């Protein structure tokens, strides 16, 4: 497990320039479109960012609810 974590961290560290470049490209595209009067891409990009922001929290919430229900079921089983 430690080797896998080290691999992931080193992969992200060595590819950091490529990762950071994407932010500048998106920002430049949105700025050019807004300056030209087109706000459709900017609002779509904002919606995409919100979607990517909310998805992991929704998954964690579903896992938490399932864990809670399973825990209650196990406690009920152990009482009898």
Image (cartoon, rainbow, N blue to C red):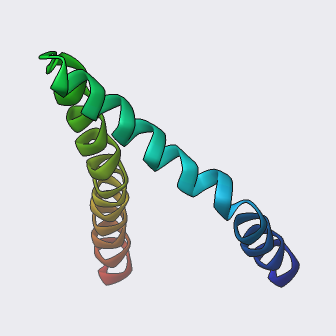
Task: Work out whether residue 78 or residue 4 is closer to the camera in this orientation and state it.
Answer: 4
Task: Work out whether residue 71 or residue 7 is closer to the camera in this orientation and state it.
Answer: 7
The residue sitting at 56% across, 50% down in the picture is: 21
Q: Is residue 40 left or right of residue 48?
A: left
Where residue 34 appears, as percent x and y from the top left, is 17, 26
Viewport quadrant of the N terminus: bottom right
Outermost residue on the right side: it is: 3
Q: Is residue 10 left or right of residue 43?
A: right
The residue sitting at 18% across, 17% down in the picture is: 36
The residue sitting at 30% across, 82% down in the picture is: 79
Task: Work out whether residue 56 or residue 28 is closer to the camera in this orientation and state it.
Answer: 28
- Would you identify the image quadrant in which residue 30 lies? top left
- Would you identify the image quadrant in which residue 80 lies? bottom left
Where residue 51 appears, as percent x and y from the top left, is 28, 39
Q: Is residue 2 left or right of residue 52?
A: right
The answer to whether 21 is drawn above or below residue 78 in the figure is above
Q: Is residue 70 left or right of residue 41?
A: right
């Amino acid at each position: 497990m430690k080797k896998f974590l080290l691999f992931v961290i080193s992969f992200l560290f060595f590819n950091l320039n490529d990762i950071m470049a994407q932010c500048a490209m998106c920002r430049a595209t949105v700025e050019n479109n807004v300056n030209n009067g087109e706000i459709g891409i900017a609002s779509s990009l904002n919606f995409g960012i919100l979607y990517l922001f909310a998805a992991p929290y929704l998954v964690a919430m579903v896992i938490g609810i399932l864990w809670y229900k399973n825990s209650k079921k196990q406690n009920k089983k152990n009482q009898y």
